[in-house]
Image (spheres, helix red, strand yellow):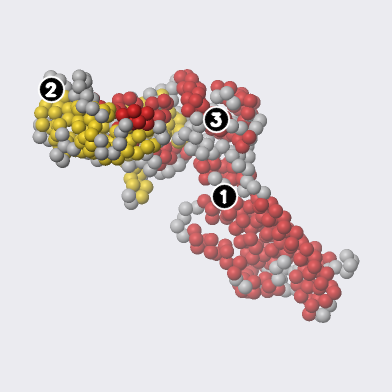
Amino acid sequence: MIASLDWPALWLSVKLSAVVTAILITIGLPISYWLTFSRWRWKFLAEAVVALPIVLPPTVLGFYVLIAIGSRSPLGQLWTSWTGHTLAFTFEGLVIASILYSLPFAVQPMAAGFAQVDRSLIEAASTLGASKRRTFATVILPLSLDGVLAGAVLAFAHTLGEFGVVLMVGGNLPGVTRTVSIAIYDNVQSLNYEAANRTALLLLVFSFAVLTFVYGVRRQPPTAV
Amino acid sequence: MSGHVLTASIHKRVSSAFTLDLQGLVPPGVTILFGASGSGKTTLLRCLAGLDRPDGGRISVGDRVLFDAAGGVDVPARERRIGFVFQQLALFPHLSISDNIGYGLDRIASEARLDAVRSIARSFRIDHTLDRKPASISGGERQRTALARALVMDPDLLLLDEPLSALDHATQSRIMADLRTWNAAHAIPILYVTHAHREVFALGERVIVMHEGKVIAEGVPHEVLDAPAHESMAAITGFENFFDATVIARRPDAGTMQCRLEPGGGPLEVPMSRAAEGSPIRIAIRAGDILLANQEPRGLSARNVLRGRIVSLEREGPMVTACVDAGATFAVHVTRGASESLGLSVGDEVWLVIKTHSCRLVASP
């Protein structure tokens, strides 16, 4: 059974998810920080934009990303002049699309984690001479690790299971853009239900394990003072 | 040894109904900032510490300007060198007591930092807790940790936002004694916020009284709280009776004035003030400063004996509050034992005995 799994597709999905998760932690932390602590009056607009991928059909998001990175767009042309090939239908293109698609799944738990940190701890740090950066590293982050971890895990799991965006932006190139969910779709199209079932079951078990982990971590009571 | 004085004038609009507007000096030593909840005490502390931004004014400690709206100066909280002890203490729950106290000392070498932490922990008697987390030490030890964390930074000013109000009185005064010992060597201004009447006498050399965003009185606790200059002040410091009266005769040689309670009440002798004959005054009397008798008393030094009738009796724990109609309605506190031995009941005829100097003249609200 193991041998008959679609290993290249599985490996590609894991690689994509890992890269996207790493990037989302890097950019998600400052975005979440800003969304939590900014007093900008139009902040809700930014919150709406970040949350958009949750409600948008993946095909719509995929379509716009395809336009934005296509060979006629400024970004696509810039990329082509650097690398000599186009961004659409490549792994890099998938990474860009997946970052946008999974952004809210990383940012929202992180922002929720930051928001539940007692404000007086943050103010105490500043009266003790700590810069914003030091306060973040020594007070906010350690006290919101649950949220950050949940954001990272959800981003990973969400990227692993994406379909519509991948199909729109990446197409179906084996080893390049053919991820697990595309492989399942292919199997079903060719009436190979047995193979589809194996891969689908794997994703199901994985997703369930991830969510169990996330909710398990969150249920731990916060340390009382 | 700094001996700097905090000088502040602060204007801050908090809401359409509430504006903080005050100025004052805080010398080295413990000054109590006293006022009811919602009088603006915490907002004032937050403005001083740089956690809230005033709309106008100037804040300086010694000759160091921390905020100056006109000059465009607004030193951020982290550079103000002001110790702040929060009401909820705000100890970092994930750090040990040692790391909590040493948190602000990150710029000095770790050995020197540990020495400083141990030394201040000894002064505040918490050196046995250094390896523990805040959740596993006692309430008093947490307060001491919060104080030590603020003071190890050697601040120019210390702000305390009701940090001890959750503790029993004995623990509270032991902590304050240790704070005074520390401050004997440092002589910084310490501003201690409270809304508890008792703490004003117990803890401070000086008191500043706030009411609705303004300073309404300041000075030595006994002078300020026992001789309230303002009715709102008198109300928050435990005066139950307020009366309008008219001055009918001044007796400068006796230091007293004869006045008439309005409307249509009896005569009352009160201490001398600058009020002219015929002018209206306002009188505050503590319910506990009035004696109650069930026969007409004779041969008393007290100058005011008023006849009246008991309108109501209310028991509150060991105390009974009697409302007596003697032209005006007086609230009188008697102990339960006294009430029973006098056999007080509603409708009884009684006499109220009030010393001249128990009548305080206050400004109207």
Residue contact at pointers 1 and 2, CB within 8 angstroms: no
Q: Please, is residue B299 above or below residue A180 in the view?
A: above
Q: Please, is residue A10 above or below residue B365 in the view?
A: below
Q: Position of residue B49 (x, y in %)?
A: 44, 37
Q: Is residue A8 left or right of residue A73?
A: right
Residue at 59%, 45% (x, y): give it. Answer: A140
User: Which is in the foreground here, disc 3 or disc 2?
Assistant: 2
Q: Is residue A199 left or right of residue B65?
A: right
The residues bearing labels 3 and 2 have C-alpha atoms spaced at a distance of 53 Å
The residues bearing labels 1 and 2 have C-alpha atoms spaced at a distance of 65 Å
Q: Position of residue A135 (x, y in %)?
A: 57, 42
Q: Position of residue A85 (x, y in %)?
A: 71, 68
Q: Write down the residue under mark 2.
A: B252
Residue at 35%, 31% (x, y): give it. Answer: B340
Instruction: Name the secondary structure under disc 2.
Output: loop
Q: Is residue A83 visible?
A: no
Instruction: Name the secondary structure under disc 1.
Output: loop
Disc 2 marks which amino acid? Pro
User: Which is in the foreground here, disc 1 or disc 2?
Assistant: 2
Residue at 22%, 24% (x, y): give it. Answer: B297
Query: Tag on residue B140?
Result: 3
Label 2 Cα neighbours within 10 Å, binned few <14 / some 14-19 / many ≥20: few
Instruction: Name the secondary structure under disc 3.
Output: helix
Chain of the residue displaying label 3? B
Residue at 75%, 59% (x, y): give it. Answer: A209
Task: Say which of B135 and A161 sits in front.
Answer: B135
